[in-house]
Image: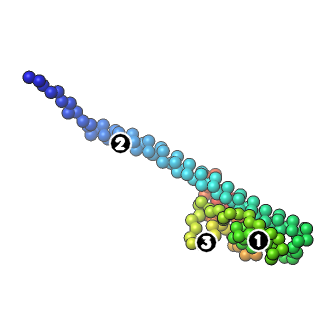
Amino acid sequence: MLTILRNNRGLTLIELVVTAIILSLLASLVVPSARLTIKRTKEIELRRNLREVRDALDAYKKYRDQAVLEKKITSSPDESGYPKTLQLLVDGDDFGGLLPKKKFLRRIPRDPFYPVKGDEIPWRMRSYSDDPDSRIWGGQDVFDVSSQSEETAIDGTKYKDW
């Protein structure tokens, strides 16, 4: 007669508990590292977007100043030469039809740390005549932008101070 050998051995409760503990320890090591990597990636995006907007503001000012220097347009002493709005960098400006319309941005970059609600502009703006530490936009022009986020960066600084 043939006998069939069976191995009915399964996992014991102890083995399952040890496995669960090992997996939870590994997960507790991986999750903070992943969060830090995500934050670092967002910080890189924020720096890149701030540089893009600031470069566009400077390019607009340089274009306008060159037009004034070449006497293609006139400028009053109370004008700074910076755009009135950020949207003007996207739409372009022809200075009343006196110059070819030139666009400086394809779109207004987003702030990865500040969720935009509706048509809200994602950046805190500062005009040329505002105090450097002012958090309220005077509305005359857009001289500089910064993040509206109150969060703290990995290096301990606030995003709004970048």
Q: Earlier in the sequence, mark 3 or mark 1?
A: 1
**Structural distance between the alpha carbons of marks 1 and 2:** 63 Å
Measuring from the top left, give residue 3's x and y in whole percent: 12, 25
Question: In the rendered view of the protein, which quadrant contains the N terminus?
Answer: top left
- Left-right relation of 72 to 124: right
Measuring from the top left, give residue 14's x and y in whole percent: 29, 38
Q: Which residue is mark 1?
A: 93
Q: Earlier in the sequence, mark 1 or mark 2?
A: 2
**Structural distance between the alpha carbons of marks 3 and 1:** 22 Å
Q: At numbered mark 3, what does the secondary structure look like: helix, strand or loop?
A: loop
Q: Residue at x 64, y 70 (%)?
A: 121
Measuring from the top left, give residue 38's x and y in whole percent: 55, 51
Q: Residue at x 35, y 42 (%)?
A: 20
Dot in front, 1 or 2: 1
Q: Dot 2 surroundings within 10 Å: few (below 14), some, or many (20 or more)?
A: few
- Residue 20: image tag: 2
Q: Amino acid at mark 2?
A: Ala
State which quadrant residue 21 falls in.
top left
Let me know if residue 67 appears in the view: yes
Measuring from the top left, give residue 87's x and y in whole percent: 69, 70
Q: At numbered mark 2, what does the secondary structure look like: helix, strand or loop?
A: helix
Q: Residue at x 22, y 33 (%)?
A: 9
Let me know if residue 132 appears in the view: no
Report if the CB atoms under discs 3 and 1 are less than 8 Å apart. Answer: no
**Structural distance between the alpha carbons of marks 2 and 3:** 47 Å
Q: Which residue is mark 3?
A: 120
Vertical placement of 114 versus 14: above or below? below
- Residue 77: image tag: none
State which quadrant residue 96 falls in.
bottom right
Q: Amino acid at mark 3?
A: Glu
Q: Amino acid at mark 1?
A: Asp
Vertical placement of 106 versus 154: above or below? below
